Image (spheres, grey):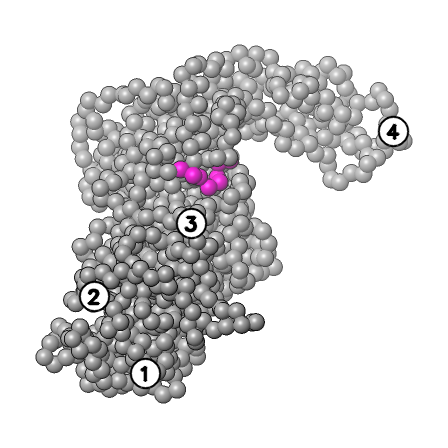
Amino acid sequence: MATSNDTTQRPRLQFSQSFRTQPTQDAVADVAPLARPPAGEQGSHDSQTTVAEMPTANGIRRSTTKAHPPNAERLHHRINASGSVQAIVVDVDVLFAGLQGGDIVAWSLETYEQLARIKAHRQSVLGLSLSDDHKLLFSTGVDSIVNVWDSSSLQRLYSLHSPFEVGDIFCVAYSSSIQTLFCGAQNSSIQWHQLSTPAVHNGTDNGDPGSRQHRFFDSLGPGGAPNLLSHDIDGTVRAAGGQILTIASNCYQTYAHKSYIYSMVLAKGLLEDESKQEALVTADGGGTIKVWAINNLYNDGLKLLFKLKSKGLSIYTLAYKPPFLYAGLSNGNAHIYNLVSQQLVQKVDVCVADVAQIQIFGGGLYCGSNDGIVTNINNRFAKVSSWQAHQGKILATAISQLDERKMLVTGGNDNTIAFWDISDHDAQARSQTSGNDELFSNLRQFVSYRTVAKNPACIGECHEAANFLRKLFNAFGAETSLISPQEHVNPLLLARFEASVHPQRRKTLLFYGHYDVVDAEADVGGAKWFADPFSLHPLNGYLYGRGVTDNKGPVLAALHAVAELVQDDCLACNVVFLIEGDEEAGSRGFEKVVRDHKVDIGKIDYVLLSNSYWLDDHIPCLTFGMRGVVHANIEITSGKPDQHSGMDGKALQHEPLKDLTVLLASLIGQSGMDIHIPRFYDTIDQLQPSELRAYRGIATALMAGHPEIKNEDAFTQSLMQRWREPNLTVHSITVPESKTAVTISSRAKAALSIRIVPSQNAEEIASSLKKVLEQQFDLLESRNTINVSITAKAHPWLGKVHSEIYEELRDAIMEVWSHDEASQRQFATSDDPTSPITSPTLRARGRRASVLTSAGTFTAASIPHEPLFIREGGSIPAISFLEREFGAPAAMFPMGQASDNAHLDNERIRVENLYKGRDVLKSLFSRLGTRTNFSLRNRASTVTI
């Protein structure tokens, strides 16, 4: 559909509630033609492997940019829909799509979140169009109805019915100058209605087109039964409200064409006496284009000016840019006509399939065909490029221009909508790209480096990633250096931004992150990654790829927050970045290198990390406590070769595996629920009433949107057990190589960890653990040998929730995630329940992930308007070390959701969380340390846990 580009008067869309729950994702189809979606998001089509993801003997490896399929680098995002995408129209920052089945769905063009979904027609939506001022949205469908909607709310204003049996209504156009709606139908008729005319109400029982029978379009089925349009049990359209009108019988041009009318546009400048007067251009399945005068419509009706013919062909789409009319034909051609001279100017051989869609952009065309291919034609009518956009037919296209981002949007019968970057890729265009686009582009490059610290084969890419980061920081104005922690360990990046503003004493914040990741391999046809983990895959409002949430995405979000403030001279504090490349491998040499370069780092007032997750998928959180950990290996050896239990086994013989079993039992007691280390529980703080109230407050807040939480007390106890109580876990018990059932192994080894809580000390617990194991082993009087090794330890951490940094973070979160409701676009909701944003079954948990990843049922009234202050059961050694080393309060700002799958297959981050995470940090960095009379507010009842 041709739409106006005049969008300057429309307000930008805002969310309809504070801390808005993510709108639901449709039941999805495959990510054609790039890959299949993650497990739990299957569709109905077979996936393909593209040139960029060819399997090798070692699994899938990403190729260089030279191996990308044509325009693959231009795919900006892809959305899965619940049905075939029949129509698309763009309104500033919202995309409306009409689907098979009758739904109209609205998505945000900034975050690709689903904003609204309404049952608009009984069967498929066939056409969508917007008025010139973008205030009205028009939809047509198989049910012979034209609906008129308020585009800002999706409230239905009018439902227009024909007095005749017209069949499917394929296309719609609206003339703002005469306030008249035109539609073209299956029975070759054209109808029109002036919205400003008095309503002609449809009061007859048979007025509903879905209840009528047409002698041709509703033919009899087997046995003589009528084959009527399907409709709801109660016989009503689910979209309610507005006036139900019948189009006047004299506003009807019968047999306007000799075939189905597939497309129509309005064209100005064709009438000699009225250069601004519009004409209606229509095209049909018989190859005829007709141009109609509408300047005296309500006196003379439609007046045919001239027609153009392409014999033996069907015309599926029209696009107009004065004086040229562009037509897409069934033989794979596009015809270009000069409507002023009424002549065919050019025939362009576009493709071998039907040309179903044409969009005009700049001086060229983008043509979508029934084989799923998009072809770009320049202003000399020559092919520039083409690429496979969909698996199946392209049924709808539109042009989107939000800020400086220019997108071609395509929809097809593979149930997907794709967004293609068609901006000019020269230096000037790059310099004008929005912050969101630049962050997206940098993350795509950052993810492409396989930065696995534990894999020697990845050392080159780790160093490339470090250099990429350094160049990026330098480009944004930072002073940088790469520091080597120790031999064979990835370099650490130290970068410093100076504050733009100059209060009496500028504060300095240290931001810690890491660029190394856990390894991952794609599994073609399997149940693991649905695509190359080291390529960024945008899908359904999420970005998939290894490291997007842990921790490459948050690191780049923090960098871009600082860079934007530097550009605007609004950075209120100095910001020092400390980004290491060995966190997933144990941070080898990290503490020493920080101490050695403490002078270079300088005095630090605050420490900030963004390396954790919300408690669920809906409510922003601030983390202020983490358990510590002590990892240990216990190995017992006999010093003898393996023996046979029948030949050598004796009742009084000490076997290594038996000794190890006794030792482990002595640690956890008969129930396995206790930790038997002397004085282990002595320093643990007693539960205070205010702390218990805070835990119950979290449970209450979550229960409002999580019906799976059946018992508030049980859930409260579960939180306390994971956050404030210690735990011992035996991870593995092994013997060398594979043994038979009769072997007495000469060696046995166990790996265990103890999670400790604030007020416990990792060094003391590690020493006590080693001592008690050795004492218990001595009591066995065994001739075997024991070796207890402490492999890693991290101190617990408890932040100061009433410190300035937490107060500023809290305010920033509320500012970014909440909006003035007066300026919001609030969409109507349908009575058709929408599908959950994640799988209704609980997702597997990764490191520090929450169990609350199922779909929430929050409403605007029930969702909290402040972030939840939470603790976590996991451990990050750097946070407690940096806090102690610099004597500066530390804070943890979770950017991702509980379902982000860090360390697991199909790791992801929601686009909205990434962009708003950056905005929260931008707000923090613009204000931290600037309040001269900062006063701590008492929130002990809600956050003192």
Q: Which of marks 3 and 1 is in front?
A: 3
The amino acid type found where label 1 is placed reads Thr
Q: Mark 4 points at which residue?
A: 648
Q: Position of residue 210 (x, y in %)?
A: 40, 63
On screen, residue 297 versus residue 881, left or right, reads left
The amino acid type found where label 3 is placed reads Asp
User: First in sequence: mark 4 or mark 3?
Assistant: 4
Q: Name the residue under label 2.
A: 194
Give the alpha-carbon distance from disc 3 to disc 1, as whole Å: 41 Å
Q: Is residue 63 visible?
A: no
The amino acid type found where label 4 is placed reads Asp
Q: How crowded is mark 3: few (under 14 residues within 10 Å), some or many (20 or more)?
A: few
Mark 3 secondary-structure assignment = loop
User: First in sequence: mark 2 or mark 4?
Assistant: 2
User: First in sequence: mark 2 or mark 1?
Assistant: 2
Q: Position of residue 508 (x, y in %)?
A: 28, 30
User: First in sequence: mark 3 or mark 1?
Assistant: 1
**Could you say which disc has been placed on residue 288 in the image?**
1
Give the alpha-carbon distance from disc 4 to disc 3, as whole Å: 72 Å
Which segment did they paint magenta? 851-858
